[in-house]
């Protein structure tokens, strides 16, 4: 996984619900753990844009519910800072389900995807409609 130059604010703690914006069958997911989080004592693990999390599907098709999936966060409402000083935020919190090789399970992504996600996960950039 490639490092990204932006200073990503971790705006989605464990327990946060977000939309799944691919066509894998999931609609709403909840974060249950953050992959690779190293924090201090008594801090709640959190993730930001281009972060990998484990999620459970709350609403969606029956074949994807009641299972633990990996997901990549592609949008968050909390602003994060780019190297040029510009701050970027989105209207919703959104993710894309991925497999163990970090390849997207769906074949289509609805809505914009920030360039930080495309730098780290090129396959997500290939199936997205718009890169911001």
Image (spheres, rainbow, N blue to C red):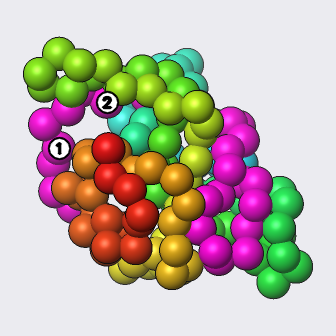
At mark 1, the secondary structure is loop
Q: Secondary structure at mark 2?
A: loop
Q: Which residue is mark 1?
A: 4
Q: Which residue is mark 2?
A: 8
The answer to whether the residues at label 1 and label 2 have Cβ atoms under 8 Å apart is yes
- What residue is drawn where x is 68% and y is 36%? 16
Q: Is residue 35 magenta?
A: no
Viewport quadrant of the C terminus: top left
Residue at image position (13%, 25%) is: 83
Q: Is residue 35 above or below residue 13?
A: below
Relative to 28, residue 22 above or below: below
**Frontmost residue, 118 versus 36:** 118
Task: Please tell me how crowded label 1 is: few (under 14), some (14-19), or many (20+) other residues with Cα within 10 Å.
Answer: some
User: Which quarter of the image is occupied by the N terminus?
Assistant: bottom left
Q: Is residue 22 magenta?
A: yes
Provide the residue span drawn in magenta: 1-29
Query: From what the image shows, is residue 67 above or below residue 84?
Result: below
**Residue 123 seen in this snapshot:** yes
The answer to whether 78 is drawn above or below residue 14 in the figure is above
- Rendered location of residue 128, percent (x, y): 41, 65
x then y, percent, for residue 34: 50, 46
Q: Position of residue 48 (x, y in %)?
A: 43, 36
As drawn, the label of residue 42 is: none
Q: Is residue 103 left or right of residue 78?
A: left
Residue 131 place in picture, x, y as percent? 32, 52
């Amino acid at each position: 996984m490639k490092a990204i130059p932006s200073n990503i604010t971790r705006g989605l703690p464990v327990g946060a619900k977000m939309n799944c914006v691919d066509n894998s069958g999931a609609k709403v997911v909840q974060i249950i753990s953050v992959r690779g989080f190293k924090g201090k004592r008594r801090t709640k693990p959190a993730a930001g844009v281009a972060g990998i999390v484990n999620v459970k599907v709350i609403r969606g098709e029956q074949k994807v519910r009641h299972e633990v999936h990996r997901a990549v966060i592609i949008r968050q409402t909390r602003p994060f800072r780019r190297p040029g000083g510009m701050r970027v935020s989105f209207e919703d919190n959104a993710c894309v389900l991925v497999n163990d090789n970090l390849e997207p399970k769906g074949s289509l992504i609805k809505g914009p995807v920030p360039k930080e996600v495309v730098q780290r996960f090129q396959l997500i950039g290939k199936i997205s409609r718009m890169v911001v």
